[in-house]
């Protein structure tokens, strides 16, 4: 039986989508049938054995699409193995230590009985629209702080946990 996993994400400027795509590709390398899609476009999670939900962080919160996803699919998610990730810090902190989930992520995790949370570094690059984004860039606080090795390592470990679940499914 092939295990099916959905990696649902909420993004504004696209960098979280790229993290989700890398997670899905890593799961596929481990023999899992995995796809990544915007959380707002996932109509039903019941076809999947496990779900990974990721959101970019803005002003200390998960994006609305991720929060809504957790609320909308809470019953089905509680019956599945669920992992979550946040992407945000525009500095190397996420590669150096564990960063706790923000309150809205924690609430979503409780709602869907998520197993584990991880924070990955984020990216903000020149050209990003929005007053706050421009301010951050003008202060020279932008850049790409995503640690692709750490993301791949986490996804490989999560694939191992998903495969180990097969016996329970
Ligand atoms: C207006 C604004 C607010 C942000 N607030 C946070 C925050 O509270 N915590 C954090 O870790 N990162 C914060 N960031 C950084 C973003 O989370 C980071 O750029 C992320 O990678 C963006 O993801 P996306 O490209 O998927 O939208 C903020 C960025 C912007 C532009």
Image (cartoon, rainbow, N blue to C red):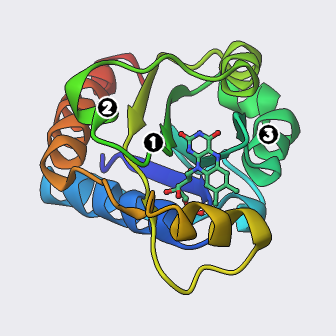
Helix, strand or loop status at disc 3:
helix
Locate residue 11: give its quadrant. Answer: bottom right
- Measure the alpha-carbon separation of dots 1 and 2: 7 Å
Q: Position of residue 24 (x, y in %)?
A: 34, 58
SS of the residue under disc 2: helix
Does the beta carbon of the residue at mark 1 sit less than 8 Å from ligand 1? yes
- Quickly name the residue at label 3: 67
Q: CA distance from mark 2 to mark 3?
A: 24 Å
Name the residue carrying label 1.
Answer: 89
Find the distance from the CA under tag 1 to the CA under tag 3: 19 Å
Residue at left offset 72%, top offset 18%: 103
Residue denoted by label 2: 93
Position of residue 102 measured from the top left corner of the image (x, y, whole percent)? 64, 23
Relative to residue 118, is residue 153 depicted above or below? below
Q: Are marks 1 and 3 in contact (CB under 8 Å)?
A: no
Q: In the image, what residue occupies the spot 53% across and 68% down?
A: 137
- Are circles 2 and 3 on residues that touch, CB within 8 Å? no
SS category of the residue bearing label 1: loop
How many discs appear?
A: 3
């Amino acid at each position: 039986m092939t295990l099916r996993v959905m990696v649902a994400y909420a993004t504004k400027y696209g960098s979280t989508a790229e993290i989700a795509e890398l997670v899905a590709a890593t799961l596929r390398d481990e023999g899992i049938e995995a796809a990544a899609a915007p959380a707002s476009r996932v109509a039903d999670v019941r076809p999947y054995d496990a779900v990974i939900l990721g959101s970019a962080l803005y002003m200390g919160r998960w994006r609305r699409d991720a929060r809504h996803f957790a609320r909308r699919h809470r019953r089905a998610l509680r019956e599945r193995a669920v992992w979550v990730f946040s992407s945000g810090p525009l500095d190397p902190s996420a590669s150096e230590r564990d960063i706790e989930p923000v309150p809205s992520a924690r609430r979503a995790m409780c709602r869907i009985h998520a197993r584990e949370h991880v924070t990955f570094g984020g990216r903000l690059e020149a050209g990003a629209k929005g007053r706050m984004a421009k301010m951050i860039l003008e202060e020279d606080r932008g850049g790409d702080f995503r640690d692709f090795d750490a993301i791949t390592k986490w996804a490989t470990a999560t694939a191992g946990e998903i495969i180990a679940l097969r016996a329970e499914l």
